[in-house]
Image (spheres, grey):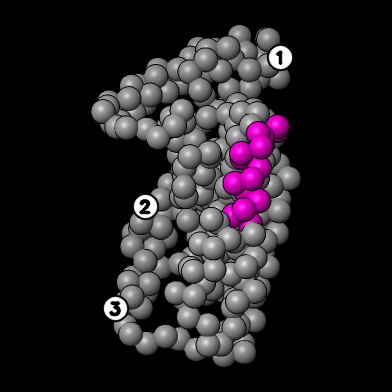
Amino acid sequence: MICPTCKKIGVPPGISSFCTQDCFKQYWPHHKGLHKMFTVDAAAKADKFFGYKFSGALRPGTVSAMRTVPDHIARPDYWSSGQPVSEQQADRSAKIPVYTAKEIEGIRLACRLGREVLDIAGRAIRVGMTTDEIDVVVHEACIERGCYPSPLNYYNFPKSVCTSVNEVICHGIPDSRPLEDGDILNIDISVFKDGFHGDLNDTFLVGNVDADGVRLVKTAFECLATAMAMVKPGTMYRDLGREITAVAE
């Protein structure tokens, strides 16, 4: 069973579920403290976004604590400070790296593992599931493959995956909002393995999505496929943008 008060105020099911009514009663003296914590957090959010002009009906939910990574897993340089020093140094250089065959193997491995994690996350999606629960799925899948979830603490990002619902363009933070029938959800996966990042994403249809939503996702995929077909030596970045625009319009 799920605590009715938790359900009302948006506490994630993972910490508001009980095996039986007796179990619920037994832990009530300790559990009720969560209600105050989440209510205070919601009030702080309301104040933080006071006057903000939202572009749609979506509103921020409660963000749970940052998850941890076992010590045996190799970490990027920003894992503790939040500052990607090596990336910042590379940005200041005009040199474009040319990778060796061995390095390309490492990149392919990171991308392949990222694809596995993305597929696992996609299969887990269901109406009523929170994006915070998706974060748990992604985090655990990364750990099982010996990967560090790249978004975690990157410039202090608090989660292991980006989940962007409906009007959120990208880099949405997983929270306590349950997915609703008709949502579209982008899941952006990045994993760090043996010194390389693999980064990929897909947009998923949640339940019964209307025709406009389906058309949006389909068109975005066609734009991606068009650009991918152009990737070869000699192609200019600007040409990719021109062809993407032509498909989108």
Check the image and report above or below for 126 versus 97: above
Check the image and report above or below for 178 versus 138: above
Rounded to the nearest whole Å, what is the CA distance between mark 1 and mark 2?
A: 38 Å
Residue 204 visible, this angle? yes
Q: Amino acid at mark 2?
A: Asn
Q: Nearer the viewer, mark 1 or mark 2?
A: 2
From the image, tell me which residue sits under label 3: 92
User: Magenta span has 31?
Assistant: no
Mark 3 vs 1, N-terminal side: 1
* Left or right of 225, for residue 233: left
Please give the name of the residue rendered at 39% of the width and 63% of the height, measured from the top-left corner.
78
Give residue 20's mark.
1
* Dominant secondary structure, magenta: helix
Secondary-structure class at tag 3: loop
Residues rendered magenta in the picture: 207-221
Secondary-structure class at tag 2: helix
Please give the name of the residue rendered at 67% of the width and 61% of the height, measured from the top-left corner.
115
Q: How many marks?
A: 3
Q: Residues within 10 Å of mark 3 (few under 14, many from 20)?
A: few
Please tell me which residue lies in front, 218 or 35: 218
x and y percentages locating residue 10 in the rendered image: 51, 22
x and y percentages locating residue 191 in the rendered image: 56, 62
From the image, tell me which residue sits under label 2: 156
Please give the name of the residue rendered at 70% of the width and 32% of the height, measured from the top-left corner.
208
Please give the name of the residue rendered at 37% of the width and 66% of the height, measured from the top-left corner.
84
Q: Nearer the viewer, mark 3 or mark 1?
A: 3
